[in-house]
Image: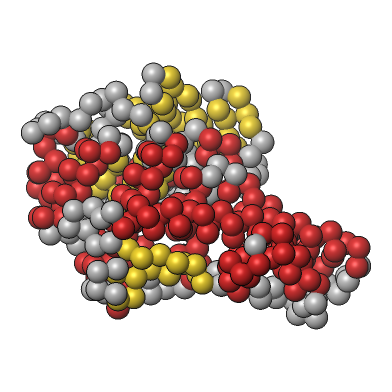
Amino acid sequence: MTVANDQQGLAVVRLSVSEFRCYPSLRLTVAARPVVLTGPNGAGKTNILEALSFLAPGRGLRRSKLADVARQNAPQPGWAVAATVQRGDSAVELGTGRDGSTERRLVRIDGRPVRSQAALGEWLSVLWLVPAMDRLFTDSAGGRRRFLDRLVLGLDNGHAARSSAYEHALRERAKLLREGRRDRSWLDAIEGSMAERGIEIAAARKSAVGRLNDACRQGIGPFPSADLRLAGVLDDRLAELGVDAAQAWYQEALASSRAQEETLVGPHRSDFIVRHRDKDLPAPLCSTGEQKALLLSILLAQARLQLAIRGLPPILLLDEVAAHLDLVRRTALWDELDALGLQSWMTGTDTALFAELGERGQFFGVTEGRVTPLLQ
């Protein structure tokens, strides 16, 4: 069995957390290959993955409020996550957290504060699959948009900043309309910004979905091939009219809908549609196991795509990943992770489910917030 090379392209090689969830303090040093965390439910395994997810832009894999991830009954408010990230032959120090005095997330890169968490995306790409996402294809479109935008961010560092600017303008417009302040010049400016950013978001999604579809068609062993598309009024207009005409159309649509407080057209209304390509079956109609396999297929295709385009794969956070996978797919997953040369952090209650990973992985036991290496 081939052992993965520790000198891979992108990996968290040191993780430190302070007053985060169940951990008053944790220092963990690992190699640049798959990490497996096993232990009983409630031991703190997913908390480690959540800490890692905060090293990327966004609200983390649980989408929690910043105040809620702080350890209960900590002597001081606030929390911190820091990591040494290996990128080829170099390394960068990333840090983030909350000091308790503000709801704003603080970010440092190599010890220097930066203004926006979007800067983290320039250094680290993180994708995740958690049990709550087992319902991704049957729940609301919002979850699917967030999943897609995480994929887009892996290909386009500017996507987070554009999305943040659009959401800010969307809230400002809604506030003005709700309060009855319909100053035309003010609304024109806000809607102009929304139209520009909104089309940029839609175009970035369209480009990413096209590339990802090509990657999905190649297939990954026993994992089903996914067929992907965007569904939304703005997406249709972009496809029909092109960027400039679609932006003008969107700004006119916003101006003509000021009688409504809610903005009914825009990238915040789009949906991400997935089908099982081989069965020509909508993902929501697939079995639970097939839906899990479709999600993994998309993530693995994305990892291949990022490696080809950016030269660096993402880091994958896979919570209870083996729960709905049979032996054939588990083995194929470990082989694909090895072939891609990426670092993954995986959790499970049973170490035996990761047996085929063997020496390619590094194993840790987690019990009541304590993390210890396991001999293999």
What is the quadrant of residue 369 in the picture?
top left
Residue 357 or residue 157, whichever sits in front: 157
Residue 317 % position (x, y):
34, 46
Report the residue that reaches farthest toward the front: 241
Q: Quadrant of residue 71?
A: top left
Name the colour scheme.
secondary structure
Is 2 placed above or below 258 here?
A: above
The residue that appears at 59% across and 60% down in the rendered structure is 202
Taking the view exactly as shown, the residue that stands out farthest to the top is: 89
In the rendered structure, the answer to whether residue 58 lies left or right of residue 134 reads: right
Q: Is residue 28 visible?
A: yes
The residue depicted at 18 percent of the width and 44 percent of the height is 334
Is residue 164 in sight in this rendering?
no
* Position of residue 174 in the picture relative to residue 210 (left or right): right
> Could you tell me which quadrant the N terminus lies in?
top left
Which one is in front, 35 or 297? 297
Between 254 and 127, the one nearer to me in the picture: 254
Which quarter of the figure is the C terminus placed in? top left
Badge count: 0
- Residue positioned 36% across, 29% down in the render: 9
Q: Residue at x 29, y 23 (%)?
A: 7
Residue 267 in picture, x, y percent from top left: 60, 65
- State the image coordinates of residue 140 (x, y, percent, origin top left): 47, 73
Q: In x, y percent, where is residue 145?
A: 50, 63
- Answer with left or right where residue 39 lies relative to residue 205: left
